[in-house]
Each structure stands twice: as C-alpha cells, then as structure tokens.
Amino acid sequence: MNYTLHNLSELNPALLPSLAKIHMNDRGLLSKLGFPFVLRYFEIAYKDPQVIGVYAQDDDSGELIGYGIASPSPESLTSQFTHDKNWFIKQIVKLFLTRPHVFIQLIISSITIKGQMNNEKDAVECVYFSVDPKYRGQKIGRTIQKELMDRSRVAGYKKIFASIETWNKASLAATLANGFTIVKTFHEGMYHRHRLESKL
C-alpha cells in the first residue's frame, strides 16, 4: 500500500469528520467524551496556527488512514471547547447525566494537563496520533509520529513530550522506536500513563 503524508492544514475541512471517526477507535478520554467533542477538537486543531498536524491518505483510494497532532500548548486546544458556551453547556450537562465517571475524569485531566509540559520553552506535545484499525500493523503510526517530530524540529522546537496509557502497547512501541524515553509512570484518575520525552 502506498500513502502520502500531508499537512493537516491542507485537508478539505469536509473530511474532518473522517479523522474524528478514526479517533473514536482510541480508548482515551477524548473519545469517551463522545463524537461531538472529538469532532470539535479536530475543528479547533485544524484552525489553530500553533498546531503541527499531519494526516496520511491512501494514494489509490484517497481514504484517510491516520493522523498526528502536536502542539506547544495542548491545554489551549481543550480550553477552546468553552468558546461556544451554549454548545459546551449542553454537552457537559449531557455528559454529567449519562456518564458521570467520564465527567469526573474530565475535571481531573483538565487540572493535570496544565502542568504536564513543566513550562518548558521550545517544547511541543505529541497530543495524538492514531491509525484506522484496518491499516494498523504496518508501522504507519510510527511514520506519522516521526513526521510530527521532524516538522516540530523544523519549526524550531527542541524537545517533544507524549503521554501514553500503559495498556497501549502498540503506541508505546512506536514512540520508543522513535527515540522517546519513559521519564515517569503516573495515575491520572482512571488512567495509568507513561510520560515520555525526546530531544528533537
């Protein structure tokens, strides 16, 4: 299979729901918040000039295969959920009433994310990278993350961070293969995560 990596900014915005659907296969907090939150996140990331984003597209079918997103300020992406207050309040009330444990985790993670980069300058966070399940096992995720690292280096960043759930062996293997090292393992509410970093 042949595929090409593109800048996220080059994506037709009509295809953002397709990236959001790929992300829904992830078992992390964002996907647990539900599709409206995931789609809104991608809409925010797509417009944010600080975001370094790539997506992989099958050269033959044109199908989206996967994506990666990095940001020097990941908390600024999630904070933009509240810009449309009516939308946000509606989604939060629905979340609280239907999945209160996820609502509690959202509060915990919102606090944790503020200090996760230790206020380091010239650093970027590999926020997400994921591949459609039917394309997994071909090292595409590893390639996407490596591209994020290369683009971050070109943009002037000196270090990159990532947090990966301990159960996610495939993402952890890809990240370690790209030169990251585990600097700590920690609990964040219901999540047990590795914190990793690499020089660029």
Image (cartoon, grey):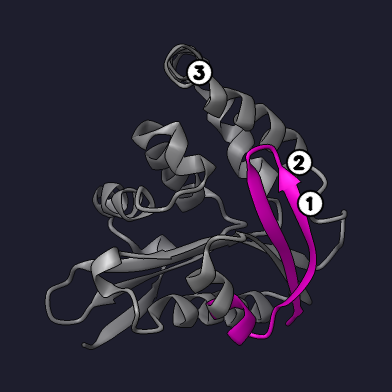
Left or right of residue 25, residue 74 in this image:
right
Q: Is residue 81 magenta?
A: no
Quarter of the figure with the N terminus = bottom left
Mark 3 neighbour density, 10 Å: few (under 14) some (14–19) many (20 or more)? some
Give the magenta-colored segment's residue range: 174-200
Q: Is residue 61 above or below residue 19?
A: below
Which amino acid type corresponds to the residue marked 2 in the rendered image?
Thr
Please provide percent x and percent y for residue 66. Answer: 35, 67
Q: Residue 112: which disc?
A: 2
The residue beneath circle 3 is: 92
Quarter of the figure with the C terminus = bottom right
Instruction: Name the secondary structure under disc 2.
Output: helix
How far apart are the two marked residues, 1 and 3, measured between alpha carbons?
A: 24 Å
Q: Is residue 160 above or below residue 189?
A: below
Which amino acid type corresponds to the residue marked 3 in the rendered image?
Ile
Which amino acid type corresponds to the residue marked 1 in the rendered image?
Gln
Instruction: Name the secondary structure under disc 3.
Output: helix
The residue beneath circle 1 is: 116
How far apart are the two marked residues, 2 and 1, measured between alpha carbons?
A: 6 Å
Please provide percent x and percent y for residue 64. Answer: 26, 66
Quarter of the image for residue 148 reads bottom right
User: 45 or 176, which lies in front?
Assistant: 176
